[in-house]
Amino acid sequence: MDCPVKYEVEGVSIVLLGSFNPVIFQPAWFVLNKILPNYDVLEPEVNIIHNQITQFRLDWLKVDVTQDRFFSSTSETANYTTLRDFVVSTFAILEHTPITKLGVNKDIHYRAENEETWNKIGDILAPKDIWQETLREPGLTSLKIQTPRDDDLPGRINVHLAPSAQVTPHGVFMGVNHHIELDELAKDDEQAVEQLAAILENNWDALLQSADRIIETTITKAIQC
C-alpha cells in the first residue's frame, strides 16, 4: 500500500456455532485447567454465570457463551495469537463439544480526515445516483458484501461496512468475517474439534492477512490516497 491506513480501534474475534453448556465457561474453570493464569480472573469487569449464558471480561479478553454460540475477542493486537491459543486450548479439553461453524473476524474503526472524505467513502462504495430521483438525501448506513472463499476451506467471506458507533465524528466501521463450515469437514463432533484446532493453528496468519488486505484495499481505494 502506498498509503497505509491507520485505525483508531481494531480487534479480532473467534466465534463458534454449535451446542454449548455456558456454565462450564466460567473464569474458575479456565484457571483450574491452566488455560488462564489466576491473576487474569481476579477482578473481571463483567461476570455473569448462568446455565443459559456466561459472560466475563478481562483486561485483554472478552468471553460470551450461550447455548448455541461461543464468542471470544480481544482488542489488543499483541494478543491476537494468544486469543487463538485460548480457543484451541479450551476445546482440546472439551473435545466432544458439537461445533458446526467457525468464524474468524477482524473489525476496525477508522477516522476519516474530514467530513468530505467520510462522505466520499460512502459515495464510492455505494453510489447515490440511482437514488436521487426517489430519495432526497440518500446516505450509506450499512453495506454488506459476500464472496466465495479463495482457499480450500468450505464457507464464505462476509464484509460489512457502516458508520462507526465508536469513533466519532467521521468514523468508519469495517468488519471481515471468515466463515468456515466445520460440519462439512468432519464426520463427528471430535473430528470437528480437531478441524477447528488445525484451521486455527495452520491458517491463522493467512486469515488475518486476508482480512487486513480486504480492509486496507477497500478504504485506500475509496479515499484514493
Image: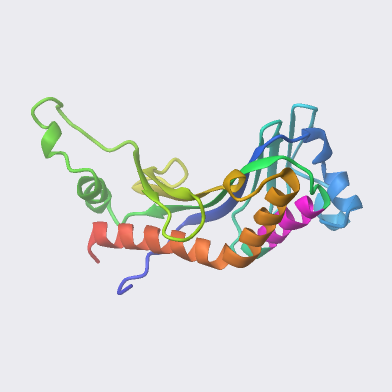
Residue 134 vs residue 41: left or right?
left
Residue 165, image x, y percentages: 44, 40
Where is 27 relative to 200, above or below? above
Q: Quadrant of the C terminus?
A: bottom left
Residue 147, image x, y percentages: 37, 49
Q: Residue at x 55, y 67 (%)?
A: 205
Q: Residue at x 72, y 57 (%)?
A: 88
- Residue situated in front as seen by the camera: 108 or 212: 212
Where is 98 relative to 192, above or below? above
- Which residue is at the far left? 133
Q: Residue at x 59, y 55 (%)?
A: 75
Q: Is residue 78 visible?
A: no
Image quadrant of residue 49? top right
Q: Residue at x 26, y 50 (%)?
A: 121
Where is 33 relative to 128, above or below? below
Q: How is the image coloured?
A: rainbow
Where is 2 relative to 116, above or below? below
Q: Quadrant of the N terminus?
A: bottom left
Q: Is residue 84 magenta?
A: yes
Residue 4 vs residue 37: left or right?
left
Q: How many marks?
A: 0
Q: Is residue 211 visible?
A: yes
Residue 39, image x, y percentages: 85, 56
Residue 203, image x, y percentages: 57, 64
- Residue situated in front as seen by the camera: 164 or 113: 164
- Which residue is at the far front? 187
Q: Is residue 29 magenta?
A: no
- Secondary structure mostly seen in magenta is helix
Residue 194 vs residue 215: left or right?
right
- Residue situated in front as seen by the camera: 121 or 106: 106
- Which residue is at the far right? 32
Query: What are the residue bounds of the magenta stretch?
Result: 82-92
